[in-house]
């Protein structure tokens, strides 16, 4: 999906915000497939024109669904997106200035889909896993487990039984 920034006809200093449904391709991460939900999330794209070029900001929120790296059950990860780019106007002779060039802008055309996809990739947590207490593979720290057992009144009868058995054995 592409957006022609030139067609926006922004005055210097002016800002415009567009809400766009941007189709985002699925991700392949660590050999697993991850689906972007929704397929074409509605993102806000803000364009501010300055003397030197255009400041761009994309914001929104998606969910990514795929296997948990720990238990392999499906997990949905909430991914807030907030990324900025600057597209310089280039030198006076009209030649684009490489240092000011955005990877996502060619001429006046912004590749919104590629930008959004990269912004999502950057916003992902380091590991795609369930929260501990929701993960099928989650094993509580044994030290915690012992403490819990001792304090849990449900275990009291079993503890008494164990004591009785030990006492009998001692006989
Ligand atoms: Zn899990």
Image (cartoon, rainbow, N blue to C red):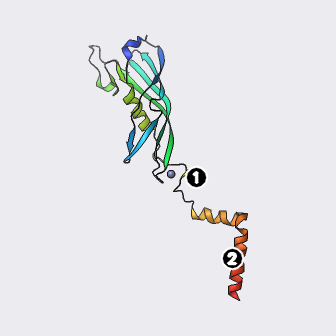
**Where residue 41 sits in the image (x, y, percent)?**
47, 29
Image check: 121 left or right of 107?
A: right
Residue hosting label 1: 133
Q: How many marks?
A: 2
SS class, disc 1 = helix
Quarter of the rendering containing residue 113? top left
Q: Which residue is situated farthest in the bottom direction here? A: 171
- Considering the image in quadrants, where does the C terminus appear? bottom right
Q: Residue at x 47, y 13 (%)?
A: 14
User: What percent of the width, then of the height, locates residue 39?
Assistant: 44, 32
Give x and y (percent) for residue 30.
38, 48
Relative to the observer, which residue lies in front, 73 or 104?
Answer: 73
On screen, 29 above or below 6?
Answer: below
Q: Which residue lies at the image location 47% right of the left edge and 16% below the top edge?
A: 16
Image location (x, y in percent) of residue 78: 52, 39
The residue at the point 61 percent across, 62 percent down is 144
Name which quarter of the figure residue 28 lies in: top left
**First in residue order: circle 1 vs circle 2:** 1
- Mark number, residue 170: none
The residue beneath circle 2 is 162
Asked if disc 2 is less than 8 Å from ligand 1, the answer is: no
Report crowding for label 1: few under 14, some 14 to 19, many 20 or more residues within 10 A (C-alpha). Answer: few
The front one of 17 and 87 is 17
- Location of residue 155 with respect to 95 vertically, above or below: below
Q: Which one is in front, 93 or 123?
A: 123
């Amino acid at each position: 999906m592409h957006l022609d920034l030139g067609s926006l006809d922004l005055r210097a200093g002016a800002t415009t915000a567009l809400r766009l449904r941007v189709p985002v391709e699925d991700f392949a991460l660590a050999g697993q497939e991850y689906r972007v939900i929704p397929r074409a999330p509605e993102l806000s794209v803000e364009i501010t024109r300055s003397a030197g070029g255009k400041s761009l900001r994309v914001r929104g929120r998606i969910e990514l669904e795929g296997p948990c790296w720990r238990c392999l059950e499906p997990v949905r990860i909430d991914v807030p997106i907030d990324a900025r780019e600057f597209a310089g106007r280039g030198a006076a002779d009209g030649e684009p200035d490489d240092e000011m060039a955005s990877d996502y802008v060619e001429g006046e055309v912004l590749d919104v889909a590629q930008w959004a996809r990269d912004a999502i990739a950057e916003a992902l947590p380091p590991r795609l896993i369930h929260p501990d207490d929701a993960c099928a593979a989650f094993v509580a720290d044994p030290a915690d487990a012992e403490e819990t057992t001792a304090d849990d009144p449900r275990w009291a009868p079993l503890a008494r039984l164990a004591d009785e058995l030990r006492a009998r054995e001692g006989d």
